[in-house]
Amino acid sequence: MRPLIISEVHKLFSTRLWLWLLLASMALAALYASLLIGFSDDPDTMTAPLDSPAGQQTLFAVASGGANTLVAVLAAIGVTGEFRHRTATATFLATPRRRRVVLAKLLVYVAAGVGYAIACLVVVASIAWPWLSAKGIDLGLLGEGLPSTYAGVVADVTLFAMVGVGLGALVRNQVATVVGLLVYRFVAEPMVTAVPALSDWTAYLPGSASAALTQVSLSTQNYLDPWLGGLVLTGYGLLLVIVGARVSVGRDVT
Amino acid sequence: MRVNLFRELACAADARVEVRGLTKHYGGVAAVDDVSFTVEPGSVTGFLGPNGAGKTTTLRMILGLVRPDRGRATIGGAGYADLARPLEIVGAALDSTGFHPGRTGLDHLRIYAAAAALPSSRAATVLGVVGLGDAGNRKVGGYSLGMRQRLALATALLGDPAVLILDEPANGLDPEGIVWLRRFLKEYAEAGRSVLVSSHVLTEMQQLVDRVVILHRGRLIREATLAELSGDHGDLETAFFELTTNQEIRP
Ligand SMILES: Nc1ncnc2c1ncn2[C@@H]1O[C@H](COP(=O)(O)OP(=O)(O)O)[C@@H](O)[C@H]1O
Ligand SMILES: [Mg+2]
């Protein structure tokens, strides 16, 4: 397994996509954090005050807001790129046991997810800390509930990496996978979750499960408990990876 | 000056490719129909047939990339998927398009060297062997078709394999490149290894191959040495023409 993982790490770092998507994730984290702090004194704000533990947890929870989807895009592009650029031929010649390739990709993109999550948390911290001290608010980085928020962010981003690997393996078509992922995340699921009558059900959708992990409360939606959200998202990821590896990856490479 | 680039093979049996009854249908049409032949160590076998004859499909079945409907191919007695270190037994260049355009030639080779647990220095070595030593740090997106063919061949050579399987490797090579390839493959076979090389351009093959396997509409129509075939029909082109036009009335 070690050689395969090294090979997949080479694949990831031998093009620049990981860097652009990381920078985009960090920029989104910076934007969300700045908006949250900048408008925190607005009387209409839905977030808890930033001198409260709940407010500070929400502030750090936005770290995964861009990174989760973008890491899924990174993983999906990495997997489907094997078919788009026809490198699957060379990959499966080197490793005829194809499921090992899926496993190696999974491990590498999950590790990338950890990296993205930590980078985005650092971005939020480095914006929040000076800004809040200027406002006279003391931000303890290990304050009440914050370690759980950090863990939630890391879990959120890494589980999305898994979803990206699984979806890419299942669909194989790069454009369809990426467009499908983005449309689902930003159009389809938000539309369904906006229906209050369905909220008992929509809480189990991947996006809501992801939000449950960090309990980011920017809307009035009800979420599952964080552990259950994590479990549900893990379920989606595993299901996609297993079905993708069993059904799709074994097909003829012509 | 001729340098023998390749070590002699320790065990020739590892290099024998046996194809038995391979069959593959696409949508009811037999792309490959009950094809059997053997690739002998120490020789270059030409795998010939017009476009659509089923050459690529057969090669991909030998390499475990396409699942046959029936039949089996073995390399040194084992199916491709059962080889413990496949790239050190079989090197294959199937496609001059199988590269990520944003990667450099060297990175491409390092990726597959790593996957096969080969030293990463092999990447530069094989790049030098195919004459791409100066282009290794350029992105493959900027390579010409001939350069991609060479990079595909370099990928096949990573594991210093006993068997080389090449699908239309002369496509896009300039005349000089073709002369080079011909010499290269002959030396490879002279070291006791097997070379199976497909082509639909017969004039390229006449001076290269020792044996021929001729495919037409998915069916094997002749397996012979070049000498046998020339005895029956004269040159390869005539033989091919006679075999493919008269195959219906052949017994
Ligand atoms: N993936 C595929 N789907 C459908 N038909 C295919 C596929 N691959 C090959 N074929 C068909 O199988 C036949 C043999 O093709 P191929 O093996 O590529 O021949 P060759 O390499 O000799 O030109 C052709 O008729 C081709 O159209
Ligand atoms: Mg072909």
Image (cartoon, helix red, strand yellow):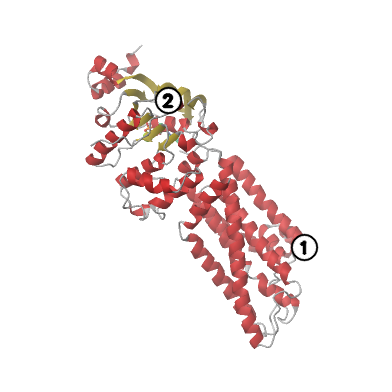
The single residue placed furthest to the top in the displayed view is B251
Quarter residue B37 falls in: top left
Q: Going 32% across and 43% down the picture, which residue do you hit?
A: B130
Q: Position of residue B193 (x, y in %)?
A: 38, 29
- The tag on residue A38 is none
Calculate the distance from the C-alpha at mark 2 to the C-alpha at mark 1: 64 Å
* Subunit of label 1: A
- The tag on residue A225 is 1
* Subunit of label 2: B
Report crowding for label 1: few under 14, some 14 to 19, many 20 or more residues within 10 A (C-alpha): some
Q: Is residue A211 visible?
A: no
Q: Going 29% across and 21% down the picture, which residue do you hit?
A: B226
Confirm or deny contact between disc 2 and disc 1 (CB under 8 A). Answer: no
- The tag on residue B12 is 2
Q: Amino acid at mark 1?
A: Asp
Q: Is residue A165 visible?
A: yes
Q: Amino acid at mark 2?
A: Ala
Question: Foreground residue, B60 or B10?
Answer: B10
Q: Going 31% across and 22% down the picture, which residue do you hit?
A: B244
Which quadrant: the C terminus of chain A?
Answer: top left
Q: Position of residue B106 (x, y in %)?
A: 40, 51
Which element type, helix, strand or loop, lies under badge 1?
Answer: loop
Which quadrant: the N terminus of chain A?
Answer: top right
Report crowding for label 2: few under 14, some 14 to 19, many 20 or more residues within 10 A (C-alpha): some
